[in-house]
């Protein structure tokens, strides 16, 4: 640390006799003090204009300009009016002379010969006072400089914060656009796969190829959703749909969804529950997503002939639902356990199985949103791993709300007249063929203006419209125009888009759409939308 030396303190000695000045300087000399000498009032004024003086010791009796006259001139100048003055005189310091001295601004009046101890004592007071003033001024300047630096840093930090916000906004827009662009080509692929699956039920090579393609499309859609979900969790934008739900039922249903994939990999899956039902307040879709992520992770690191066991129980001490997913896979060192839950983290190179490294990070974020936890444990490499998810259970559960299984909700769909508005030729045609195969009557348009004309002439029950249509009439304008036409008030409007953020769904709802489906649309989600349309017709 650099220590800044204290600045000099100046005393001004004014006397027409040189020997008096020499004697006074010898008497007052001390470290940090600079003595200025003047033989006349004129010399004193010149020195006062050059230096800031802590004390002036002025002889009263001087030729041309006496001490009183010098003091009066000093008091008349802003620079010197506050300089303390001690008068010294060899004459008689009568009452009248003292009064004039104090009237001229003196702080003291000493008679010659001067008592050295008294003068030193009085001068020390003014030396210390001036030094304190210097320190205060220095601190003030340092404070002003520090304030200026802080202000500069604040402005710089504000600029950086704005740049970060702008970059974050651009990143969000990029992710949303990336998801849109990735989902668009997936849409016709998934539609074509679903169409092939509906037309092919035999166990042959074509059927196997269809199943492989379907799984890979689902995997890619899952990666896109995970990428966006992690970004939403980091920004605190995930909204849970809280309801009373049964963890045991969610785990069993999710396990059945993953069982065929694990079975094909030669991995045995078992679900063991110590309770028949375990109710929590949570988002059933997100809880299933957490369990699915942990199952997917276990499956990636478990070789053929291995096994995965899911244990579901209630911890009576913490009153939590405890879901343990234990595998016989490659395991890990406990020193690595924490960073597994960081976004984009990956296993070591010899264990890496692909993916973006988002599943566990997403699970951790969703668990915390449910006031729960997730942790991983392993005895080391080759010893398997156990991931434990906890969620608080309901202390006083009300009457159980049954959870409907959308997979069994296909009944009751009648044939509908559907208009598809999609500028992507492959996506539009594949969706048309899929809907025709499901038993519906389908027309197609490739821009907004044509879509509005077809809707007015054909009067369909349902309009499924892409949002990013070419020309001036995009999907939002289509919805507004259809809602403004009272003769088409019966229409059920379904938005179909590669954008699936909350703000995107809010925007389509405000535009008049009944539902919002995200590309590549899942066949079951499409079926559910048509069930809803059929119910409302």
Image (cartoon, rainbow, N blue to C red):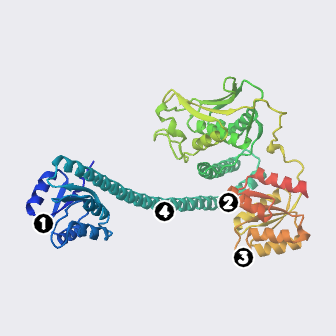
The reply to whether residue 386 is visible in this rendering is yes
First along the sequence among labels 4 and 2: 4
Q: Which residue has dot 4 on it?
A: 159
The percent coordinates of residue 81 (x first, y second) are 31, 66
Residue 446's label in the rendered image is none
State the image quarter where residue 319 is shown.
top right
Circle 4 or circle 1, nearest the eye: 1
Mark seen at residue 16:
1
Mark 2: few, some, or many residues within 10 Å (few <14, many ≥20)? many
Q: What percent of the width, then of the height, locates residue 498?
A: 67, 60
Residue 46 is left or right of residue 401, and the answer is left
Distance between the alpha carbons at the discs numbered 3 and 1: 98 Å
Q: Nearer the viewer, mark 2 or mark 1?
A: 1
Relative to 57, 155 lies left or right: right
Looking at the picture, tell me which residue is in the foreground, 523 or 429: 523
Mark 2, residue position: 499
- Counting residues from the start of the chain, the first of labels 4 and 3 encountered is 4
Q: At numbered mark 1, what does the secondary structure look like: helix, strand or loop?
A: loop
């Amino acid at each position: 640390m650099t220590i800044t030396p204290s600045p000099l303190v100046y005393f001004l000695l004014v006397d027409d006799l040189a020997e008096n000045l020499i004697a006074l300087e010898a008497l007052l000399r001390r470290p940090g003090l600079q003595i200025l000498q003047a033989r006349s009032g004129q010399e004193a004024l010149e020195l006062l204009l050059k230096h800031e003086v802590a004390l002036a010791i002025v002889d009263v009796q001087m030729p041309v300009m006496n001490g009183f006259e010098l003091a009066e001139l000093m008091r008349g100048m802003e620079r010197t009016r506050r300089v303390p003055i001690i008068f010294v005189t060899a004459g008689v310091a009568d009452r009248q002379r003292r009064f004039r001295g104090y009237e001229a601004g003196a702080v003291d009046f000493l008679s010659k010969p001067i008592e050295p101890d008294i003068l030193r004592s009085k001068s020390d007071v003014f030396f210390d006072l001036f030094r304190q003033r210097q320190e205060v001024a220095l601190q003030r300047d340092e404070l002003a400089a520090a304030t200026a630096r802080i202000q500069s840093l604040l402005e710089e930090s504000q600029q950086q914060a704005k740049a970060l916000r702008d970059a974050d906004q651009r990143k969000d827009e990029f992710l949303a656009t990336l998801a849109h662009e990735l989902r668009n080509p997936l849409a016709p692929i998934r539609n074509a796969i679903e169409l092939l699956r509906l037309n092919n039920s035999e166990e042959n090579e074509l059927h196997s190829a269809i199943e492989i393609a379907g799984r890979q499309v689902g995997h890619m859609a899952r990666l896109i959703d995970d990428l966006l979900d992690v970004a939403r969790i980091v920004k605190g934008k995930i909204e849970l749909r809280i309801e009373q739900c049964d963890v045991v039922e969610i785990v069993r249903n999710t396990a059945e969804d993953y069982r065929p994939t694990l079975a094909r990999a030669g991995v045995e899956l078992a679900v063991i529950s110590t309770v028949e039902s375990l109710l929590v307040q949570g988002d059933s879709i997100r809880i299933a997503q957490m369990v699915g992520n942990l199952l997917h992770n276990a499956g990636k690191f478990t070789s053929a002939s291995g096994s995965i066991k899911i244990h579901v129980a209630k911890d009576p001490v913490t009153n939590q639902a405890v879901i343990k997913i234990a595998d016989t896979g490659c395991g890990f060192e406990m020193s690595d356990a924490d960073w597994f839950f960081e976004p984009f983290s990956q296993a070591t190179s010899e264990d890496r199985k692909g993916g973006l490294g988002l599943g566990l990070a997403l699970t951790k974020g969703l668990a915390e949103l449910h006031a729960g936890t997730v942790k991983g444990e392993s005895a080391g490499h080759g010893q398997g791993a156990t991931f434990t998810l906890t969620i608080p259970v309901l202390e006083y559960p009300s009457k159980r709300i049954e959870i409907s299984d959308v997979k069994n909700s296909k009944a009751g769909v009648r044939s509908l007249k559907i208009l598809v508005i999609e500028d992507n030729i492959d996506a539009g045609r594949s969706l048309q063929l899929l809907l025709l195969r499901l038993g519906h009557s389908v027309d197609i348009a490739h821009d907004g203006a044509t879509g509005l004309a077809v809707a007015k002439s054909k009067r369909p029950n349902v309009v499924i419209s892409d949002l990013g249509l070419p020309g001036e009439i995009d999907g939002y304008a289509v919805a507004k125009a259809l809602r403004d036409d009272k003769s088409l008030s019966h229409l059920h409007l379904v938005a179909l888009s590669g954008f699936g953020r909350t703000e995107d769904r809010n925007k389509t709802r405000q535009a008049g759409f009944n539902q919002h489906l995200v590309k590549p649309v899942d066949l079951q989600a499409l079926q559910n939308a048509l069930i809803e349309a059929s119910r409302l017709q």
